[in-house]
Amino acid sequence: TALLPGLRMSVGCVPQQSNAPPPAPTFHETESPGKLSDWGLFSLGEGLSLADGVIPYDLNTPLFSDYAHKLRTVWISGEAHARVYRDDAIDFPVGTVISKTFYYQKPHGEFDGRVLKKPDASGRIAPALRDLSGVRLVETRLLVRRKEGWDAATYVWDDDQDDATLKRIGDAQHLTLVAAAPEGRTTQTPFAYVVPDVNQCAGCHAQNNTSREISPIGPKLRHLNKDFAYTEGMANQLDRWREAGLLAFEGAADAAPRNADWRDETAPLGARARAYLDANCSHCHNPVGPADTSGLMLTPETPFGNAAGLCKLPVAAGAGTGGRRFDIAPGEPDSSILLFRMESTRADEMMPELGRALVHEEGAALMRKWIAAMDGDCS
């Protein structure tokens, strides 16, 4: 199924941890099977391994999901490859399977509901996946490109972590986030981790509110244009996808759009903040998205001004304003609706509405710093 089997093996695989033969990826044309293993994307031994042709990737600035770690992969069946068709969006062919596996590291021993708050691996496959005894696999979400369009399928990992089962109606798991605190102490925060149902998947991935067709959010040139540590060394993801026959585009990767890394303190503060809003908000807050009636556009091509929230009055936020007048009040983070909604966990106030139960403290701190540094006022 691979255009360049040898190359795809080298860029996609974590070394096998068992003597079992590696799985063979399988494309299911009509229905999603009941078990994740039927797709053949992964094999499990002491660690999690990727099948031949299944390539891992990362994003410059990812979506926040209750501090879950994520392993992202792409596999294309047959001889087709993806193409850039508009701006930096990618047109994936029929036979594409995009996966995202959500997991946490455990404090120790048997799983008792506690998970660790730790930085996610960036630009590489997390070493934690080489030894699953210290990992709690939660779910794997698939986007499958069939003839009729994209389909979403969510698989919840079994307690023994031998396989994952299809859950069309979603799931909820009660977890406790354990985080380091000053003076050697720890904090423990209970929360409900929500696995989305089919309709909730469409709620985020239907980026056009008119057509309601779902599509991938993360795999765009601006998000993918970064280095990744493959088996044989560092390489730009766009170059590697092209070399592996996954992607066709003209020109050098250096000339492609590139989002800032929100964690990179050497990058301009505004670029980091706008990249964060792009990754977490723009799939709804775009001119044709589900939040188009709000008038708040958080795409990277929106000039930073009233349309992007600066001194913008809310349209119909209701309780979501927190009694604040403007989406972004320059120099006044505590008077800005945007920050209020990021720091809330109430269902009628918080943004994003789906995908989190916890406050992203580091993301909110970035927004606070960015707004506080703005000049001017809304008088």
Image (cartoon, rainbow, N blue to C red):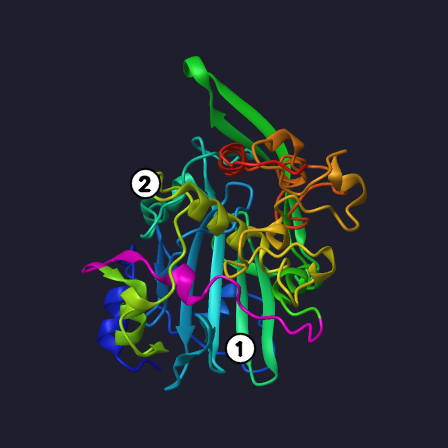
In the image, residue 12 lies in the stretch drawn in magenta: no
Q: Is residue 146 above or below residue 362?
A: below
Magenta-highlighted residues: 210-234
Give residue 117's mark.
Answer: none
SS label for mark 2: loop
Q: On the image, numbered disc 1 is attached to which residue?
A: 145
Q: Quadrant of residue 252?
A: bottom left
Q: On the image, numbered disc 2 is attached to which residue?
A: 266
| Residue 234 in sight in this render | yes
Q: List the single residue furthest toward the front.
A: 379
The foreground one among 221 and 2 is: 221
Under mark 1, the amino acid is Arg
The foreground one among 123 and 8 is: 123
In the image, residue 225 lies in the stretch drawn in magenta: yes
Under mark 2, the amino acid is Thr
Residue drawn at (32%, 52%) of the image: 123
Q: Nearer the viewer, mark 1 or mark 2?
A: 2
Q: Is residue 330 above or below residue 47?
A: above
Where is residue 1 shown, x and y percent of the image? 35, 82
SS label for mark 1: strand
Where is residue 345 shown, x and y percent of the image? 68, 37
Residue drawn at (38%, 74%) of the image: 24
**What is the CA distance from the residue labelled 1 to the residue labelled 2?**
38 Å
Say few, some or many: other residues with alpha carbon within 10 Å of mark 1 (under 14 / 14 to 19 / 20 or more): many
Mark 1 / mark 2, whichever is N-terminal: 1
Q: Quadrant of residue 2?
A: bottom left
On screen, residue 242 versus residue 289, left or right, reads left
Residue drawn at (32%, 49%) of the image: 130
